[in-house]
Amino acid sequence: MSRYVLVAYGHAFGTLTTALLALLFERKNESKISLPVCVNIFFLGLFGALLRTTYYAGMEYTSSNFASAMGNLAPATTFVLAILCRMEKLEIKKCSGQAKIGGTVVSFAGATLMILYKGITVLSLHLPHTKKLRSQSNVFIKQDWIKGSFMLLIHCLSTALLYILQAKTLNKYPAPISLTSLSCLVGTAITTVVAAIIDHRASSWRLSWNIALVAILYSGIMIFGITVYIQMMVIRKKGPVFVTAFRPLATMLVAVMGVLILGEALYLGSVVGAILIIAGLYAILWGKEEEKRNTLPKHAVVLVDNSIKEKPEK
């Protein structure tokens, strides 16, 4: 199935899903949509369409393992953009600031290693039903590995921009379900026009009872609808950097499922690069937590100690 058509259908089903949820849970929403919010919604739809299209392209040119591992570069990219947008603080002289910088450098080094070095095969299952698929995809990977890596880098940048913009928009329009529905609606319009221009065959838009329909429904309901809404809720409470902390878990799950279901091979460069990206990610998160701990007011600690001393013994 054309990835452009898949993205367009996914946005359409995501719009329907989140519109229904907004009707159920945010009917009493009194937030007004101003002109700046409309502009942000347009760019949310644009970045959402861009990141999903480039992700599918990058996964097609490389593999699902590689694409998921490269997605772990998004936290470091989000952190850099958050500093530039003054949403994150960076104090170079403190250990927390040094951990953030070091984690960012290590993450980018891991991504570079994954792009430039494949190495030996670490794990590969010779499954009968995947032998032909694997032999065909290996030739494709050798030809378009760099091209797919470039697409995934664009995906990471688009993801970071999306998180930053979501955080800023939620401050002006605190209705995450409605905001998700509106951004999906804009994404539907953009992706439908692009898909119609690139792939204007009527057969490409025809749906049947097969795995393509399952992919469209899952993509629209879970990814474009519910997942984006959950991300907005977490961003609203914890910030855009925190929401990316669980990306390594997806990489581990995709690696296992890719080997078992798709018959994909794990290469040494991908494993080492993924480890470096994950290590850099948690260095950034440690720096954030250390920074929060150091900014806790001293009088709050005194009050806590006094409350403990004054507590009567039972």
Image (cartoon, helix red, strand yellow):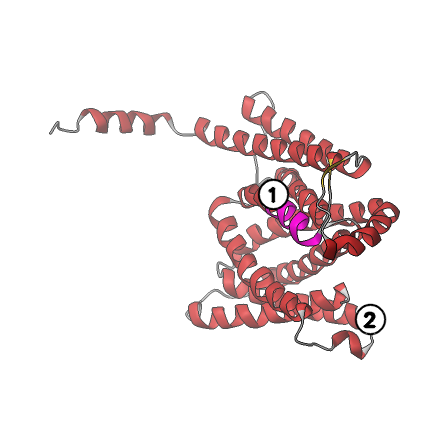
Residue 259 horizontal side relative to residue 121, left or right: left
Q: Which residue is mark 1?
A: 252
Label 1: element kind: helix
Looking at this view, name the residue that lies furthest to the front: 128
Indicate whether 156 appears above or below 191.
above
Quarter where residue 118 is shown = top right
Quarter where residue 100 is shown = top right
Evaluate whether residue 283 shows in this view: yes
Check contact, mark 2 vs mark 1: CB within 8 A.
Answer: no
Q: Which residue is mark 2?
A: 199
**Circle 1 crowding by C-alpha within 10 Å: few under 14, some 14–19, many from 20:** some
Numbered range of the magenta stretch: 252-262
Point out residue 283 in the picture as x, y percentages from the top left corner. 58, 30
As drawn, the label of residue 8 is: none
Evaluate whether residue 241 shows in this view: no
Three-letter amino acid code at the position of disc 2: Asp
Label 2: element kind: loop
Three-letter amino acid code at the position of disc 1: Met
Indicate whether 178 appears above or below 282.
below
Point out residue 243 in the picture as x, y percentages from the top left corner. 54, 46
**Circle 2 crowding by C-alpha within 10 Å: few under 14, some 14–19, many from 20:** some
Question: Is 41 or 75 nearer to us in this picture?
Answer: 75
Question: Is 44 or 152 nearer to us in this picture?
Answer: 152
Whether the magenta-drawn stretch holds residue 184 is answered as no
Residue at the (17%, 29%) spot, across then down: 311
- Locate the C terminus by quadrant: top left
Residue 151 horizontal side relative to residue 306, left or right: right
Residue at the (86%, 49%) spot, across then down: 139
- Locate the N terminus by quadrant: bottom right
